[in-house]
Image (cartoon, rainbow, N blue to C red):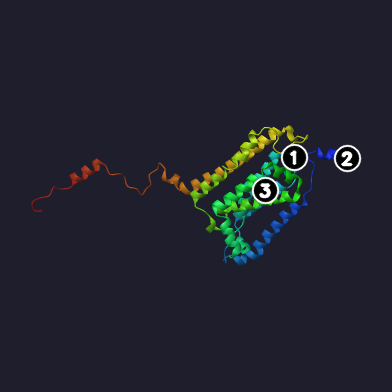
Amino acid sequence: MVLQAADTAISTDPWRFQWHPEVWLLVAFLTGAFIYMVKAIGPKAVPVGEQAVSRRNIYAFVGAMVMLWVASDWPLHDISEEYLYSAHMLQHMMLSYFLPPLALIATPAWLLRILVGDGGLYRGLKFLTKPVIAGVLFNVVVMITHIPLVVNSSLDNGPLHYTLHAAVVLLSLLMWMPVVGPFQELHIGPLAKCIYLFLQSIIPTLPAAWLTFAEGTVYKEYDIPVRVFGWSVADDQQLAGAIMKLGGSIFLWTIVVYFFFARFANGYGEAQDYKRPADVDEPLTTADVEREFAATAAPTEHDA
């Protein structure tokens, strides 16, 4: 009875610390592998005098590791898996929208070429990162991970849960590859990037709207007596829908606007400056023409 009471007390505390050594080991392994590749292999893979990584690569890698750790460790991971579906949605947003582009930006082209090679694996990557294929695969896994049966089953099944997370991250990496991937030959044009990312923001509208306007409990595993922050099941579901729709859309649309102005409005400020460049002549006026005619002597019979 004492043990049962203790277990009940622990289960009703959403903020109890839970140790996840696998997350720390994963972050440590990825960090160690990155440092080894950059220090030991990088100098041999790039031309003499060039740096193996840039500051941009390093900052993006640190951001990716922090994002992975926050999304996968206590408290977000535990709150998202046991108490709030809105926290679960935030976790998925971090793993599918925020983490993958950072990971790709962090990866130098030479590093990915060493890992992928130029054989069948590269050809497979080239095929899977075609915009239509990558976009469809990513949105399919997004839809699948919001099916109630899948969500409820994954919360009670560890292998299924981690498989779904791995699929979300992997397919998200493929989706982002034509936009910010290390291989420039796999990139699509600036306007195509804008259209591509805009379309990625439309599909999630369906499950987001469903969550926002659903009547009753969608995911029974989150219908529990312990309510974090006092949020009801309906409040939790509506917040999850808002995070999915607004969070993803705002993030993607911000990148779309950046790409648009970076490509199509390059030099706009200089072109629209009210100051006239010093090397541009004054415009020719009627008075200038009359003055020139007056200064020119009329032709004489001798000239004719």
Is residue 151 depicted above or below 134 in this figure? above
| Few, some or many residues within 10 Å of mark 3 (<14, 14–19, 20+) | some
Residue in the picture at 71% in, 34% down = 233
Q: Amino acid at mark 2?
A: Gln
As measured in the structure, the alpha-carbon distance from the residue carrying label 2 to the one carrying label 1 is 21 Å
The location of residue 303, given as percent across then percent down, is 11, 53
Residue occupied by mark 1: 221
Mark closer to the chain start, 3 or 1? 3
Q: Amino acid at mark 1?
A: Glu
Badge 1 element: helix
> Which numbered disc, 2 or 3, marks the residue that appears first in the sequence?
2
On the image, the x and y values in percent for residue 118 come to 58, 65
Name the residue that disc number 2 marks. 4
Please state the horizontal and vertical placement of residue 96, each as a whole percent of the image: 64, 48
Amino acid type at circle 3 is Met
Badge number at residue 67: 3
**Residue at the spot 53% in from the left edge and 58% down from the top edge:** 185
Crowd tier of the residue under label 2, counting other residues whose Cα lies within 10 Å: few below 14, some 14–19, many 20 or above? few
What secondary structure is marked by label 3? helix
Q: Quadrant of residue 121?
A: bottom right
Name the residue nearer the viewer: 160 or 279: 160
Q: Is residue 43 left or right of residue 260?
A: right
User: Which mark is nearer the camera, 3 or 1?
Assistant: 1
How far apart marks 3 and 1 lie (CA) works out to 26 Å
Q: Earlier in the sequence, mark 2 or mark 1?
A: 2
Quadrant the N terminus occupies: top right
